[in-house]
Image (cartoon, coloured by chain):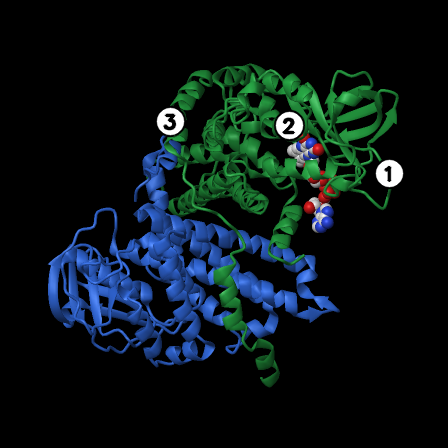
Amino acid sequence: MSELQSMIFETADRIFADHVTHDLIAKSEAGEAPHDLWRDLTFAGLPKALCSEAAGGIGGTWSDVFGIIKAAGARAVPLPLGEIMAAHWLAEQAGLAVPEDAIAVFAAASGPEPGVTVQISLESSLPTHLVAWDEAARTLSLAVLKEADSPRSIAGARQLSLHITDQEIIEIAPLDLPGMSPLALGAMLRAAQMAGAMEAALRLSVDYVNERVQFGRPIGKFQAIQQQLAMMSGHVAAAARAAQVAFETNSAFDIACAKLIAGEAAEVVTDVAHQVHGAIGFTYEYQLQFLTRRLWSWGSEFGATAYWAERVGGATLATGPDAVWSAITENRLVL
Amino acid sequence: MAKTSALMAGRWERSSEATMSADFFQFQPFNLPPEAEALRADVRDFVARELKDRPLSELGQTWSGSDPEFSRKMGAKGWIGMIWPKRYGGHERSSFERYVVLEEMLAADAPVGAHWVADRQSGPLLLRFGTEEQRQEHLPAIARGERFFCIGMSEPNSGSDLASVRTKAERVAGGYKVNGRKIWTSGAHRAHFMIATLRTQSDPEDRHGGLTQFLVDLKTPGIHISPIEDLSRRSHFNEVLFEDVFLPETARVGNEGDGWTQVTSELAFERSGPERFLSCYPLFRELIREIGPEGDRLQRIAIGRLTARLVTLRRMSISVAGMLNEGANPALEASVVKDQGAMYEQSLPNIARALVELVPTVEGQSPYQEILGTLLQAVPSFSLRGGTREILRGIIARGLGLR
Ligand SMILES: Cc1cc2nc3c(=O)[nH]c(=O)nc-3n(C[C@H](O)[C@H](O)[C@H](O)COP(=O)(O)OP(=O)(O)OC[C@H]3O[C@@H](n4cnc5c(N)ncnc54)[C@H](O)[C@@H]3O)c2cc1C
């Protein structure tokens, strides 16, 4: 990690550790906003971590904040920090001014028709504004986020499906980011959060099996348990590496791979982590569920595993049998 | 719930702190440097030239396929012993440059099997533990692609439990007398030498301390090599019988009793390379050809999953190479890549069969069917050779702090 990376990571992680308790997550899932957590994150300048110093930011890159987004996933931080960072990042590039007291989240409009529905998965009732990136129209719209009656995901996040035209639009600006798309940006965030949640589920599982005693010894001493966790840890490592690459290159292809690898890994991780925990892992009171419910939900957000697999597969087939290898080694596979 | 609360108190905070501060694995973000990439075009030209018009029956074997002439040509190119010192015939290149050569050879399905073991593990073993004489004698010949090695670890009653080897090396005047049997020895029938792990002391209390490694000239009287047909009737591996075989003192590698430590360091090399996920690449390529440029939705999804896994495994493997290059010991990470790589490769033939309905063949017509036929029969061995799936996961479990 570079100096900047470790500085902002440590700041963020300390704030997470101070605030994010079982109680806080439970309250957030019930609709209460984590104001104190937000205040400290804002005070540390993290929402604008990706903005230039001229725009009041820290001047970080996506690679610089990878550890933070991953840690937010690992701790099930109950507010959409990644989407908030993305909103400020996009706004600066499009020249949109986000009001000082606004809490704006990035939203993806990625349908073929311009100006239509934006999908938001909102982890908290904090956000006040939307920064909607419309791929087809190549615009970025800043709008007031109007409360809408909305279903909740299994991770407790409100699933908003809004017509941007119904919102109180403050400003619209053109935006074109070649090689990036709204859906890919969201998928990149989820891939890192998932990698973090899986690392945390692995750690939780290892700690648990070393403590839980049955048949006179810690269940972690049983080979059946060891083998499952070892296998699972390989998937966790793969997901973490793939997500890190996505944050380094920001290429849609690497993001697609990361999201789909995370989705596949999460299937194994949720299965094994629950298995080795026994009944206690199946309770609300125990923490594993904060991670596994998010993994299930995140896997379906911003393009599910099969969606990204189809895009990657389409790109592979279109490249053709004799060019695929060189395309892989030269990072030339594109979606 | 009172009882469960007590059991869980503080776990969230504690365990998530641990997650942040202590990752289980270190897959550091290495990329191949430009000087390594610069080699690629040359390697591609070479294989395109050398490997055109190969018979179907040779396809899909990657590093099990063997062609001494091809090995000599690679030696002439300076692509064997690449990272060894020049004074031993090496080329003082980086691990990354070697990595590029290896992965290009595997992707091209090149018959690299003759020199593979010598380049990957016997040479490095001699560099670390051999005498100056042994290095001078063998390393330049290996690097020229003229001297081939095999690995004598397994025995009929010693598989995963390698420390139980029984083949005995007894001290006699001027050296040792060897009696016993090695088995599953890949390539023994075309190798010149074997690195054999033998028992020099039979103290049941100290199984590890009684092992010593030897450099065995396979032409020595008393050695009998007989091929074993694998399930597809190919003979890659052998049984090697030792009957009163005399080995001079100079054949010993390292000190008596150091065999266990040496053999474990050798296994780290054995497990870390790109051959642990690229052995099936030719099938992936031909599968793409059979499906065509568009495919249906199911085919695109399945191919996408395979591509993403391949790309990710490669990135993980490159980071292992990077850590090796810096002198770190990524044994744990190497085991993870081998385990994940074997799962990927073992799933590939079955996924291929679900996507394209063509019968796997031997002596077939299309490269796809031929490679599928070869690999369908080969992949069960991928989670056996080089340490079984269960043994690798045991190593990973130890890394997780479970053992
Ligand atoms: C194609 C091929 C090439 C080979 N080439 C070589 C070579 O060149 N040189 C060489 O020395 N050897 C070679 N081997 C041998 C290889 O190293 C052994 O097959 C391997 O170490 C396993 O030993 P085994 O076959 O005796 O199986 P066993 O050790 O008998 O294992 C059988 C099964 O039991 C499991 N098992 C064993 N112990 C445990 C345990 N403690 N806990 C849980 N499960 C356990 C294993 O994982 C496996 O699933 C080769 C093997 C193959 C298939």
Asked whether B61 or A226 is in front, the reply is: A226
Picture quarter containing residue B130? Answer: top right
Question: Between marks 2 and 3, how big is the CA–CA gap?
Answer: 28 Å
Q: Is residue A244 visible?
A: yes
Picture coordinates of residue B342, whole percent (x, y): 56, 42
Specify few, some or many for label 1: CA neighbours under 10 Å numbering under 14, 14-19, or 20 or more. some
Amino acid marked by disc 1: Ser
Ligand 1 falls in quadrant: top right
Picture coordinates of residue B29, whole percent (x, y): 43, 45
The chain ID associated with circle 2 is B
The chain shown in green is which?
A: B
Q: Secondary structure at mark 2?
A: helix
For residue B202, which numbered disc appears in the image? 1
Question: Between marks 1 and 2, how big is the CA–CA gap?
Answer: 25 Å
Task: Name the N-terminal-most of marks 1 and 3.
Answer: 3
Q: Secondary structure at mark 3?
A: helix
Picture quarter containing residue B132? Answer: top right
Picture coordinates of residue B71, whole percent (x, y): 55, 18
Picture coordinates of residue A290, whole percent (x, y): 46, 71
Residue indicated by mark 3: B38
Asked whether A164 or B82 is in front, the reply is: B82
The chain shown in blue is which?
A: A
Task: Name the N-terminal-most of marks 1 and 2.
Answer: 2
Amino acid marked by disc 3: Ala
Q: Residue at x 75, y 43 (%)?
A: B161
Question: Between marks 1 and 3, how big is the CA–CA gap?
Answer: 52 Å
Amino acid marked by disc 2: Ser
Mark 1 and mark 3 residues within 8 Å of each other at the beta carbon: no
Query: What is the quadrant of the C terminus of chain A in the image?
Result: top left
For residue B122, which numbered disc appears in the image? 2
